[in-house]
Amino acid sequence: MLTNEEVRSKVLDIIADIALDDDVTGIKDEVALREQLDLDSMDFLDIVMELKKRHKIEVPQEDYTRLASMQSCVEYLAPKFNA
Amino acid sequence: MAKYDCVIIGAGMSGLAAGIRLSMYNKKVVILERHTITGGLNSYYSRGKRKFDVGLHALTNFVDPTERGRPFNKLMKQLRIPYDDFKLHPQNYSVIQFPDKKIKFTNDIDFLTEEIRLNFPHEIDGFMSLLNQMQQVNEVDLSNELIMAREVVRNYLKDESLIEVLFCPLLIYGSAWENDMDFSQFVIMFKSIFIEGFSRPAGGVRTIIDLLLKRFEECGGELRFKSEVTKIIAIDQKIKAVEINGEQIIECDNILSSMGLPETLSVLEENNHSKTKPLPRVGNLSFTESIVITDKLPRDLGIDATIIFYNNRPNYLYQKPSTLIDSQSAVVCFPNNFLYGNTPSDYTEGVMRVTNIANYDLWNDQLLFSKENYKDQKINVFNQSLQILKNVGLGSNGKSFEVLFKDVFTPTTIKRYTGHFGGTVYGSIDKSRNGQTDINGLYICGTDQGFLGIVGSMLSGISMANLHILSSSL
């Protein structure tokens, strides 16, 4: 059973690899990732693909908006990590 | 043998970039390369201890690493290659040299704007509104319609001589069309050259290719040299396999081909050709390049510009010449004149590259007629290059120099190494912007998808891999 903090850290690993020129240590959980980092739609597609590749987690297209901020990512992904 | 998810034809910039994306996400992928080295249109070779770049004069789209959302940053992120690894050195400045005007530009668009204010004061308002208009355009939108650029630009600029000056670098650094280009491509080129600008990786094109290769290997991708695709096999308009070197069959679900649109369709099995559709046209533009190595640096011979776009006519003729080369226009690149700062340049001798528009058919005739003739013509081209170097100011400070090494490549050289029909560098004038063909599973990337330059070619490989192979498997 992963804690929310552990889920957050796994998501952060993915984001750090994708936004490799950005500093991800100061990400504010409640603010949209797009506003803090240089991420576009291609990069969000990468987050989805990395989740599938690393953790076998599938995110259907209608749920992409749930990945908008770190907080919403953790809320949405925690049950999937623990399923 | 297990079937591949995707076969990529060509280990140039676009094929390698596509290969990285696909293997990164665990697709079973193989890149098939005809030759024994990678790079395609942008490659390299050695003679003795000297190393030479082919293709790349400069990397366009130079950005400050802190600037966001620009094409170069985007593609590095997609490939997970850190910006610093490219070790980019910006240009000093470049010149567009016409008989009665010299316009300088740098990697700062304000510099060019000032040059236009000085030289074309009556056009400065039009130029500013053209700049504004271009900021509104999404030039890489795959659904953009073909509109010719001159027509659009004439809505903003009235002075044809300014239009000629602005089109000159943009045409010769990327247009498959004669004397004009698609407006989306014009905007891509304008932003990548005039707004973002030129740089050179330390070590030249090799640095880029090595980074891509290393990344592709890290991702577990497979690359086969000496593997020429001789047939693309499809059944009921759906991709089944490729045949290499006329013998071996490799089964696959998808093909991303960077070999060019007419070249790709020419190896497609005959029964798959649409009878009603004409084949894509072969472009008319090819080039010669003279490489001149001198004992002195260009700086010590009176030239500190990085690239000079030379044109000796009132208007700029970007078209297939009726002679072997057009000696009245050229692009001259001085790799020594990038700003290397404290890093020692990899070139200790003077290096000069003179590129002329050339006629493929005439060069091919020379070669067929006799090897000796062909060699003599290469010497002629070299001598004309020396004259052009003089015309752009080499030796203007009274210093003389010695040529230590020379080489000339011609349209037939380009044909031999790239496989492009007609020795074209910018491919067919018929592009497949969204990468699709009539065959399910056969997609085009690279030159004939239509994103230009080295950055464009990598972006092409990445976006075609994303769009056609990765997105559809989510």
Image (cartoon, coloured by chain):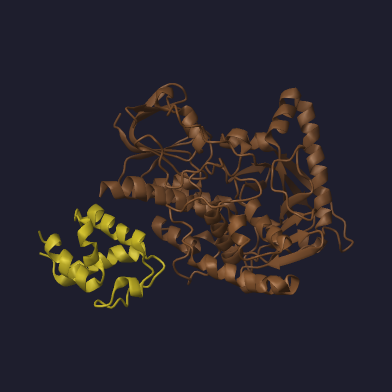
Chain colours: A yellow, B brown
Q: Where is residue B227 in the image (x, y as percent from the top left)?
A: 47, 31
Residue visible at 47% across and 28% down? B267
Give how far across and how far down residue B70 sits, in percent. 47, 65
The N terminus of chain B, quarter of image: top left
Along the line of sight, the residue nearer the viewer: B387 or B33? B387
Quick one: A26 or B468, which is closer to the camera? B468
Up-down relation of residue B383 to residue B249 (above or below)? below
Indicate left or right for B173 with B468 as reference: right
Residue extending farthest right? B398
Does residue B45 appear anywhere in the picture? Answer: yes
Residue for point 49% across, 60% down: B85
* Front-most of residues B338 and B150: B150
* Percent x, y of residue B128: 61, 72
Is B413 on the left or on the right of A52, as rendered?
A: right
- Residue B188 rendering spot, x and y as whole percentages: 54, 58
- In this rendering, the answer to whether B357 lies above or below A46 is above
Query: How many numbered marks are there?
Result: 0
Front residue (pair B158, B79): B158
Residue B111 makes an appearance in the image: no
Q: Locate residue B193: give its quadrant.
A: bottom right
- From the viewer's perspective, is B424 left or right of A7? right
